[in-house]
Image (cartoon, rainbow, N blue to C red):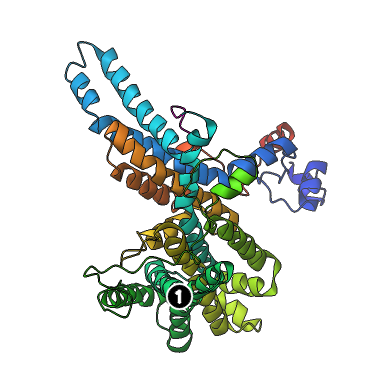
């Protein structure tokens, strides 16, 4: 640019256009990138979604378990002794160990091809659903609390109290079949709701942290029921010196779904799957409707996102905390009913929760605190538990490997950026970086 043009106030056409566009001298023009193809956007949204992250977390958990299976297998250890002489034997041994373990896991949880007939072969799937029933119910309760911003670590205590109430009703009050089962189930739900409601009440009125309160109430419930199981006239079976309750009355026990399967044209065989699985399906639908279609669910989600903003908007946060913990405890109480009235009908001890209260936290995390996510996560963990026993019996693999899988899955679920970095996934809602066009590069050069 010449000095004369500057003195006369003349601005070149290119400089005028840049000044009109608000671009400083020497600055690259702000050129919009070309629109991203619709197919790429769809693929990016799918690959950055929670479902894909959960699936890949499961894959990573299985990969870690594969490494542990290979390391601890005696055949692999023996073949590794002459690895450099015959390396192929080592890789064959690794493949046999991992393949045999996961084949046994499939046979124990989905379908056993070695059993005669479809009715006998499908039994592992019914075992998976039986193990999954209390996990789903308790997972729904924990997930509901998560959506409100609360951490219900007291599933163990709520299950124990609910089981004690349901069991006491089942053998103490003779009633007709359906009514007895309904009353015992409602008793378990009320017992869990009361035990969970105590936590919500203490948090709302005194500000007590729900994690500390729920953990302490776990011990209170455990030792209270343990005491009652050693007391004649309370929960201990008559004439027994062991801390075990009487068996549930037959009119209060959940009906086995074998008859229903046979009535629908299924094979005439015996399964342990009971009516509690139908109840957890209904509970899943209820929680989905509550959170996504009701005004109470809107208040729950609003408090979970930002309790201060919800309070400013006129929502009574303390009431929401109490209601959330009541409903959370009620859902966990349904798991206690499934244990006493569906699985351990011959009498229960103080360990009736069987670790379900803590496993439910893992199920809720894997399900991303979504009702249907929790449902399928519970089935997955039920499959791991059902197949783990056959894997241990047939392959000699410790059942602790299953616990490792669960722990690793939770680890990766809690660290989504780690999963994205391992599989090089796009970030959710990511935008492509802007690219300078040839015209923009030429303009900068000039």
Query: In the rendered image, is residue 276 in sight?
Result: yes
In the image, residue 316 sits, relative to residue 7, either above or below, namely: below
What is the total number of numbered labels drawn onto the structure image? 1
Which quadrant: the C terminus?
top right
Give the residue displayed 38% in from the left and 65% down from the top: 247
Is 233 displayed left or right of 18 in the figure? left
At mark 1, the secondary structure is: helix
> Which of 409/9 is in front?
409
> Which of 388/168 is in front?
168
Q: Which residues are magenta?
A: 111-115
x then y, percent, for residue 334: 50, 66
Q: Give the quadrant of residue 405.
A: top left
In the image, residue 423 sits, relative to residue 225, either above or below, namely: above
Mostly what secondary structure, the magenta segment?
Answer: loop
Label 1, on which residue? 169
Which quadrant: the N terminus?
top right
x then y, percent, for residue 429: 63, 49
Give the residue displayed 64% in from the left and 71% down from the top: 297
């Amino acid at each position: 640019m010449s000095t004369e043009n500057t003195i006369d106030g003349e601005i070149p056409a290119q400089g005028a256009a840049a000044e009109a566009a608000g671009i400083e001298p020497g600055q690259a023009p702000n050129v919009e990138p070309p629109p991203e193809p619709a197919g790429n956007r769809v693929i990016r949204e799918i690959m950055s979604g929670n479902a894909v992250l959960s699936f890949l977390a499961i894959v990573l958990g299985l990969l870690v378990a594969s490494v542990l299976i290979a390391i601890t297998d005696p055949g692999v250890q023996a073949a590794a002794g002459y690895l450099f002489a015959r390396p192929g034997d080592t890789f064959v041994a690794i493949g046999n160990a991992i393949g045999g373990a996961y084949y046994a896991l499939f046979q124990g949880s989905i379908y056993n091809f070695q059993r005669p007939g479809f009715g006998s072969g499908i039994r592992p799937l019914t075992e998976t659903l039986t193990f999954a029933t209390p996990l789903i119910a308790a997972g729904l309760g924990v997930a509901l609390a998560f959506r409100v911003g609360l951490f219900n670590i007291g599933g163990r205590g709520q299950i124990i109290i609910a089981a004690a109430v349901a069991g006491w009703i089942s053998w103490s009050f003779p009633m007709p079949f359906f009514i007895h089962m309904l009353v015992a189930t409602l008793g378990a739900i009320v017992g869990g709701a009361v035990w969970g409601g105590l936590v919500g009440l203490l948090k709302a009125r005194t500000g007590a942290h729900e994690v500390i309160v729920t953990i302490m109430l776990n011990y209170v419930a455990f030792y209270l029921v343990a005491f009652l199981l050693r007391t004649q006239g309370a929960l201990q079976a008559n004439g027994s010196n062991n801390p075990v309750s009487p068996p549930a009355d037959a009119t209060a026990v959940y009906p086995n779904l074998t008859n229903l399967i046979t009535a629908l044209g299924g094979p005439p065989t015996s399964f342990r799957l009971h009516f509690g699985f139908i109840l957890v399906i209904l509970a899943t639908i209820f929680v989905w409707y509550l959170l996504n279609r009701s005004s109470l669910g809107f208040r729950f989600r609003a408090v979970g996102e930002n309790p201060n903003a919800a309070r400013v908007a006129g929502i009574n946060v303390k009431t929401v905390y109490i209601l959330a913990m009541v409903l959370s405890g009620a859902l966990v109480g349904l798991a206690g009913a499934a244990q006493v009235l569906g699985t351990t009908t011959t009498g229960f001890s103080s360990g009736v929760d069987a670790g379900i209260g803590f496993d439910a936290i893992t199920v809720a995390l894997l399900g991303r605190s979504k009702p249907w996510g929790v449902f399928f996560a519970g089935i997955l963990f039920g499959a791991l538990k059902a197949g783990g026993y056959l894997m241990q019996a047939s392959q000699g693999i410790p059942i602790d490997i299953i616990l490792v899988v669960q722990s690793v899955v939770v680890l990766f679920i809690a660290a989504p950026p780690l999963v994205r970095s391992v599989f090089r996934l796009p970030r959710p809602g990511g935008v492509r970086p802007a690219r300078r066009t040839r015209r923009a590069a030429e303009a900068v050069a000039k």
